[in-house]
């Protein structure tokens, strides 16, 4: 009997706690602003609005959404020393079929093979870049990649050897583009059947359940271009976000961000020549800028797939003027 009474008491206590939490949710923790005043958001990184644009709000509720009032700002580990000692770089280059001794200039190590391919690596950051001469290569002009999976494997093998963390760049974030060679130039095409080369863009995964966006230049900081047989180009410069070093900051009111969008205080992920744009949704995100000191939250205005606009989200009182 006493056990039954105890269970009833515990059940009532838990229900009371749940009800109290639902009626009186805990207040969000105050912003720590531990980094102090943040650098001004780089509005030159991306595509600037051109001409006079009229925006129309057409969200599900026809109103701006209610979003969090604070968000995390993450430090970027630029020039942070890695484990890429010269011997490690040489080992990686060997695994990528570069067996020759490198040319060394400062922190750069440059490997060249008999086919004219070059692999440049930075000892401090571990970043790598593969370059080949492929625009007029007859083997590429006369072939087509068999499948997307085939070229993705080529890219995955390269980046795993270079040291890519798959948790930061998950496979479900990979973007595929198709290219064909015409008269010595590389042009995007719509399908694999028309392509000589496939571009594999790696996108960083969500941070703190918030998406990380990039400005579309065709080539992200982790990018590969593959033919049927080989990679012809690769860039390995992963975004070095220190997920353990962050501070929370207050965000500006979303209505203020919408007004800033209207006045051109924004960047687009793609070039845009339209004069009338519809805002279908607004959310929080991060815009990846490898040269920035911090990963700073932005308001993401969806202007119709695939066009997005980004407005700095941190309250202006915490941004350098």
Image (cartoon, rainbow, N blue to C red):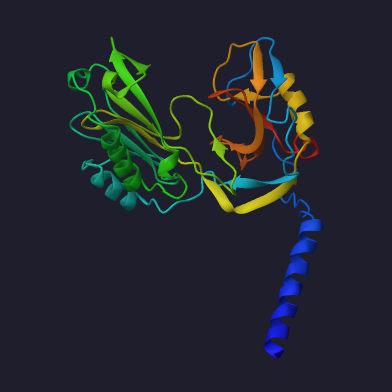
Residue 1 screen position, x and y as percent: 70, 90
Residue in front for this viewpoint, 57 or 172:
57
Q: Is residue 231 above or below residue 67?
A: above
x then y, percent, for residue 295: 61, 41
When asked about the image quadrant of residue 193, the answer is top left
In the current view of this chain or complex, which residue is farthest to the bottom? 1
Residue 57 is left or right of residue 200, and the answer is right
Q: Position of residue 12 (x, y in %)?
A: 75, 73
Q: Quadrant of the C terminus?
A: top right
In the image, what residue occupies the spot 75% across and 37% down? 319
Q: Is residue 194 visible?
A: yes
Picture residue at 76% right of the left edge, 51% below the top: 31
Instruction: Judge by depth and name the residue closer to the eye, 107 or 232.
Output: 232
**Can residue 25 be seen in the rendering of this structure?**
no
| Quadrant hosting residue 302 | top right
Q: Residue furthest front?
A: 1
Q: Is residue 307 above or below residue 95?
A: above
């Amino acid at each position: 009997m006493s056990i039954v009474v105890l269970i009833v008491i515990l059940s009532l206590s838990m229900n009371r706690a749940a009800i109290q939490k639902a009626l009186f949710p805990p207040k969000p923790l105050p912003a720590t602003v531990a980094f102090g005043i943040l650098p001004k958001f780089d509005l030159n990184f991306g595509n600037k609005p051109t001409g006079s644009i009229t925006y129309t709000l057409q969200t599900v509720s026809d109103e701006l959404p209610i979003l969090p009032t604070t968000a995390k700002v993450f430090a970027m580990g630029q020039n942070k020393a890695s484990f890429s000692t010269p011997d490690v770089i040489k080992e990686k280059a060997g695994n990528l079929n570069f067996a020759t001794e490198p040319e060394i200039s400062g922190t750069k190590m440059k490997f060249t093979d008999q086919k004219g391919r070059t692999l440049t690596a930075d000892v401090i950051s571990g970043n790598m870049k593969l370059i080949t001469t492929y625009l007029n290569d007859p083997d590429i002009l006369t072939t087509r990649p068999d499948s997307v999976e085939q070229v993705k494997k080529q890219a995955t093998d390269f980046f795993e050897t270079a040291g890519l963390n798959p948790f930061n760049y998950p496979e479900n974030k990979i973007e595929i583009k198709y290219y064909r060679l015409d008269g010595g130039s590389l042009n995007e095409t719509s399908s694999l059947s028309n392509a000589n080369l496939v571009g594999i863009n790696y996108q960083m995964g969500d941070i703190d359940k918030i998406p990380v966006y990039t400005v579309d230049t065709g080539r992200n900081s982790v990018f590969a271009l593959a033919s049927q047989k080989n990679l012809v180009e690769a860039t390995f410069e992963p975004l070095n976000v220190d997920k353990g070093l962050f501070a929370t900051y207050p965000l500006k009111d979303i209505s203020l961000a919408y007004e800033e969008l209207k006045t051109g205080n924004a960047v687009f992920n793609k070039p845009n020549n339209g004069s009338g744009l519809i805002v279908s949704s607004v959310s929080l995100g991060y815009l990846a800028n490898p040269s920035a000191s911090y990963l700073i939250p932005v308001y993401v205005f969806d202007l119709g797939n695939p066009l997005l606009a980004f407005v700095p989200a941190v309250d202006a009182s915490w941004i350098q003027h």
